[in-house]
Structures are given as C-alpha cells and as structure tokens.
Amino acid sequence: MPSKLKLIFFSLYCALYLNTRAQVYTITTHFDSTNIPPTPDYSKPGSWAALPDRIDNADKTPKGLKNNQDSAAADVFFIYPTSYLDQPDDKYIWNADINNKKLNEKTDGNSILYQSTIFNGSCKVYAPHYRQAHYYIFITKDMHDKQAALEVAYTDVKAAFEYYLAHYHHGRPIVIASHSQGTIHAARLLKEFFMDKPLQEKLVVAYLVGMPVPKDSFPTIVPCTQAHQINCFTCWNTFEKKYIPPYYEKGLINAVCTNPISWTTTEIYVSASQSKGAVVRPFDKVRPKLCDAEVHQGLLWITKPKFPGSALIRTPIYHAGDYNLFYLDVRENVALRVAEYLKTH
C-alpha cells in the first residue's frame, strides 16, 4: 500500500475532490470482538444512507440533469467507500458506528452526493450505512485485524442486501455499484447471491470500481467489453498517465480495467473530446470533456485534469475521482445498459 507521504497526498486529494477534511489515523490496538458497534437494523430508514422513497443526497443532480427515481425501472444497490479515516471520536476503533452522526454527514456529503447520484437517472438508489472498516485496514500488516474488521462490515452489507431483496426488490433488474472498500464487499455479494444463482438473471451490470478485480473472479459473470453489454462487470482504478504505483504487483497487475469513456478493455487511447463530462467541486456543475482515458496493463491512465484548484493536486493517484471524473459517462452508460436489459427481458 502507499507510503505515509502518499497517504497524506491521498487525503488532500479527497479533500479537494470530495469536499472532505480527511486525515490518516494510525490504530495502535488490535481488533477486539467485544468492542464493535451495535448491529444495524435495516428495517429502520435511518440505517440507510439512501432510499428512493425519502429525500436524501442520492436524489440530487448537477444542473441540467434529472432525478428519475420515481419512474426508474431498475434498482441500484450502492456500497460506498471508506469515509472512516480519522481518529475515532467514540469507543469503537476498527469499525464505524452507523449512528455516528458526524461520520454519516461526511459519507452523505461525499460518496452519496458525488457517486451514488450518478445512478438516479435510471435506477432507484439503495445505499445502506454499514459498520465500515477503518481506513487503517489498508495499511496494517496484521491480516487478522484486517479480515476481522472487513468481516463485520460485510456482515452488514449482506444483511442490508437481504433486507432489500425481501422488502424492496420485487423482481426488478439490479445494478450493483461500489467503490474502494465497497467493492471488496460487492465482490462477495456477487459470488454469494448472483454467481450461478437465479438472481444472476436480474443482474444488469456491476460497477466494481476502485479496487483490483481479476478477470476470473466470477466465472459466470464476465468482464464487460462493450458499452451495452449486460450481466457483466466493469472495473477501473485511475492514475496519472505513465504512473505505476509501488503496490502494482499486489493486485493491479491482474486487474480488469474498463475504459469508462469507450467501455472497452482494449488499450486504445480515448481523448477527452469523447468524454461526456466530470463533476468535481462544486457539485452543481458538469465539466464536459475534462478527462481522457487509456487502459494500460490493469491501470486506467488519464492526463492530469485541469479545473479551478487542480494545480494543488500533487499526487498521481486519482482514486477519489474514479467515479466523478467520469460522472456523465457512467450515468449515460447505466441508462444504456438498463435499456438493453429491459429490451431483452
């Protein structure tokens, strides 16, 4: 994983792109199974970051776009990335309490606003709060601590998805979407609930973004290679052109990489003129033709984007912008794949 210096740059990058005051905190104690937050109750609306039948940040859109959740024919189950970066302000260390108001506001104002809203043009948005593992899991060398914290988090994601299936699904087409830590959990959901299961028939597409996902992860759910393809998965991890991270061989070397402008996996450069548009700060503004994109051996390479404030970015790791640098490209692709699903089913 990145050095301490790169983590600091990563935090500054989060702050610039997603309007967060990110910090990196080092956990000095081991995971303690007797000190984990209360189990969420997904029958309570407060256990969800987004539900389609209430007003929340997943309903918002940049200027010129429309929230179509009322009429959407498909659902998206969105699993947000890690927002638990700071020193804990309660007694829980390795996993976040979903009742932590300050953390929920951070999540809702960042990934729910800048990422989940991509899907409200074509899908009803369901996004559970969950006892996310602290960002330190990506730094620690103690695999027991890491896996124990991730297991708590996945237990919640699984329970929320089971509640969704029992109470909200009603046989509708499903899009799975995730970022970073969320993608770790989404990959497990696909294996447990979709792969070789009847529910696979309901899968429109899975956007598994911000974590390396190998090609053979789901034998019956293949990587998408065309923009309209369904029952497949996409994946990309964004870096500045020519940059190869020091942790490349720990997973990215074998990762699927989808170009989120062309929606192919070929290593063909796509210019910014073909991009539909990005959404950075402020959220209300779409910035057309901001980014180019090129697949390179498991990495998505882009030229450093230029917008007010971008000169302050010194890191070549564009992880925090994986989705919103291609906001309109993903939004239109979701609509295309949902339309294709409805046409063929």
Image (tube, helix red, strand yellow):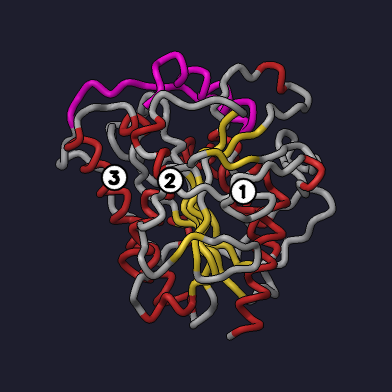
Q: Which amino acid does label 2 sit on?
A: Ala
Q: Label 2, on which residue?
A: 255
Magenta span of residues: 1-30
**Residue 179 on image: x %, y %:** 49, 46
Q: Would you call the spot at circle 2 few (<14 residues within 10 Å), some (14-19), or many (20 or more)?
A: many
Q: Given the image, on which type of amino acid does mark 3 rest?
A: Leu
Which of the pair 235/182 is nearer the observer? 235
Residue 41 visible here: no
Q: Does residue 340 sit above or below 87 in this rendering?
A: below
Task: Check if residue 24 falls in the magenta segment.
Answer: yes
Q: Where is residue 14 in the image (x, y as percent from the top left)?
A: 56, 29
Q: Distance between the residues labelled 1 and 2?
A: 13 Å
Horizontal side of residue 112 vs 166, given as left or right: right
125 vs 144, left or right, is right
Q: Of marks 3 and 1, which one's residue comes earlier in the chain?
A: 3
Mark 1 = which residue?
A: 259
**In percent of the image, x 27 and y 27: which residue is there?**
140
**The stretch drawn in magenta includes residue 88:** no
Task: Evaluate whether residue 324 shows in this view.
Answer: yes
